[in-house]
Amino acid sequence: MDLQILEFIDQLDELIFESPRVPFTSNRLINEQDIGDLVSEIRRQMPLNISKAAEIIKQSEEILSKSKSDAHQIIEQAEIKKNSMITASTVYQQAEIKSQKLLEECRRKINEKNLAAEHNINEKYKEAHDMVKNAEIKSKALEINANNQKENILENANAESESIQREAIYSAYKEINKLSKKIESIKKILYSHSLSSNNLPSQKQSVANINTTRYQNQNS
């Protein structure tokens, strides 16, 4: 509203409240001319202010309509963006869940492979340990067997050596006895030959005796 109209209204208000009262009533004595002039001025100013007010109202309505349109577009864009964000969030959540499942599956497989590898290593270590232990046992058994065979061979060799020595001693003893007998026989023959050397028939008999003795010695 224009300031001049406000001044006229203030003047009107002053004129009314400054006018004298009618005794014993709530009425006042007002100057008609003054009231008429102020009302005329207000009426003269009103159309211009009403036109400005209408224009302001129209502009306000246009601004309000544009604001509503802009607000509607903003709301639509926000709704689209929200739906897009919701879709993106859903996709992200699904991707995250899938990646988490894949990660857990990979971890599970890695753990299974690690456990299998550890079990295999333990089994191989146990097999190697058993093989070494068995080899040590076999080696010990072979060593004991070799020592036993060695002792048996030594015992057999000693026994055979003793047997050969006994046989050699016995054979030598027999040969000595044979030689002793031959020597005794030769001595007897020589002695007999010396006794009968002067008698030829006796010599022939001695030769016969010698031949007989040799024959017996060869057969004995």
Image (tube, helix red, strand yellow):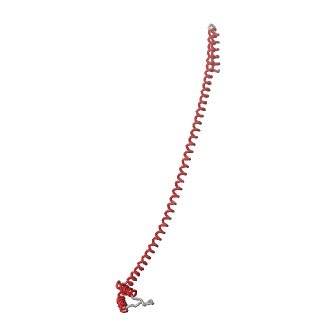
Instruction: Please name the residue shown 48% across and 64% down the image.
Output: 96
Q: Which residue lies furthest to the front in this view?
A: 23
Q: Is residue 92 above or below residue 120?
A: below
**197 in relation to 175, above or below:** above
Q: In the image shown, does 161 or 39 lie closer to the viewer?
A: 39
Residue 46 coordinates in the image, percent (x, y):
36, 88
Q: What quarter of the picture does the N terminus occupy? A: bottom left
Depth check, front residue: 153 or 101? 101
Image coordinates for residue 184, horizontal then vertical, percent: 63, 14
Position of 52 relative to 81 (above/below): below
- Horizontally, residue 31 falls left or right of residue 178, namely left
Residue 166: image quadrant is top right
| Residue 89 placement (x, y as % from top left) | 47, 68
26 in relation to 180, above or below:
below
Residue at (44% x, 74% y) in the render: 78
User: Between residues 164 and 197, which one lies in front from this camera angle?
Assistant: 164
Could you tell whether 208 is left or right of 101 in the image?
right
